[in-house]
Amino acid sequence: MSAICTDFSLEKNHLKAKSLQVINGAQTISSLANQPSNPEIEILFRLTKTQSVKTEKGFNQQIILYNNSQNLVKVSDFRSNDEIQLFLEREIDGRKPKGPLPKLRYVRKRGVGRRGAGQAIKLEDMAKIRYSFLYEPTLIHSAPKSLWSLSDSGGVYEMAFGVDGQVASAWARETLDEALVAVAFYLRIADATKRVGDGDPEMRFLRRLRFHGVALAGEFVRRRYEPPQARELLGSESKFDEAWNTFWPVVRSVLIDVFTGAEEGGASMFGFVRSSERWQQMIRRLRRHLA
């Protein structure tokens, strides 16, 4: 079991640590906490004193990486204890159902918050939703692991979860609301594309294009709504429905037309979702509709 802290002291058989954070062995601690005291049990424990317990980058991130390298770990797992992920868990889990959004659960880590009431939004989902909504959708297909790497390692974590290109520990209310508007569009798009595909097997390709739809939603919202108005979409289901009923028929047509044209030209789905050229075609068509 391994942990980091900013300071510690030993007093007889008692360890006192400041800002203790377990980085490997949380399940062991949970198991021990639910068992009766037993002096026969011995646990190998490594404690590392560092300048801070932030794990977004630097030495602490390396400690986490190499302490978990013996396990099958997803890249996103190394971000699950970042301050911004803890912030999103608190804010999203504490939000009451309102407007177009149901009760949500933010699942920042496998095994944490997997059960319970509400629609689960995994941290991987949030990264893809927010990056697509703010920027474009091709990277999440061509290099999804870059969503969890910092820019100095060639990644876009600061863009997926940061503010103004910087790693953030929390978001302002407007930033959080903008992300939740993106989630609302994602949930509608995911549901609509599934229903279309279930009704017409030849249209199942739309499901694969849901993040292209989210990216087009970002363009739609930025062109049609000032920031205060965009926030109003969260507070009123009728206002969101009005926006959706304008947005979806156009975007559905754009997705179908661009993909069908590419397919007729011999393009595969694998290449299509990664193509910046096809994405630019979609943007141009949407802008013509919105002009």
Image (tube, helix red, strand yellow):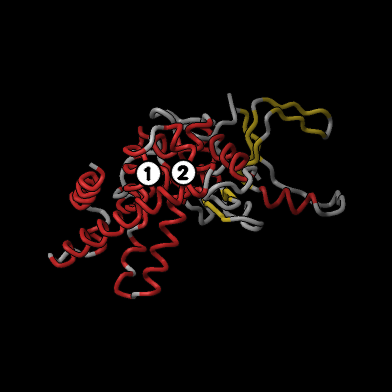
Front-lying residue, 16 or 208: 208
Please tell me whether mark 2 or mark 1 is closer to you in this view.
2
- Look at mark 1 in the image and give the residue it sits on: 133
Looking at the image, is 56 positioned above or below residue 188?
Answer: above
Residue 155 appears in the rendering: no
Q: Where does the C terminus fall, quadrant-wise?
A: top left
Q: Which numbered dot is residue 181?
A: 2
Residue 31 appears in the rendering: yes
- Sequence order check: which comes first, mark 2 or mark 1? 1
Q: Residue at x 61, y 49 (%)?
A: 97
> How dense is the environment of label 2, judged by Cα within 10 Å: few (below 14), some, or many (20 and up)?
many
Front-lying residue, 280 or 41: 280
Q: Where does the N terminus fall, quadrant-wise?
A: top right
Element type at mark 2: helix
Circle 1: residue type: Phe
Q: Are marks 2 and 1 in contact (CB under 8 Å)?
A: yes
Q: Residue at x 66, y 57 (%)?
A: 116
Element type at mark 1: helix
94 to the left or right of 223: right
Circle 2: residue type: Val
Looking at the image, is 35 positioned above or below residue 284?
Answer: below
Measure how far apart labels 2 and 1 are at the Cα level: 9 Å
Q: How many marks?
A: 2
x and y percentages locating residue 189 in the rendered image: 41, 57
Q: Residue at x 77, y 49 (%)?
A: 42
Front-lying residue, 117 or 200: 200
x and y percentages locating residue 264 in the rendered image: 14, 67
x and y percentages locating residue 180 in the rendered image: 49, 43
Q: Which numbered dot is residue 81?
A: none
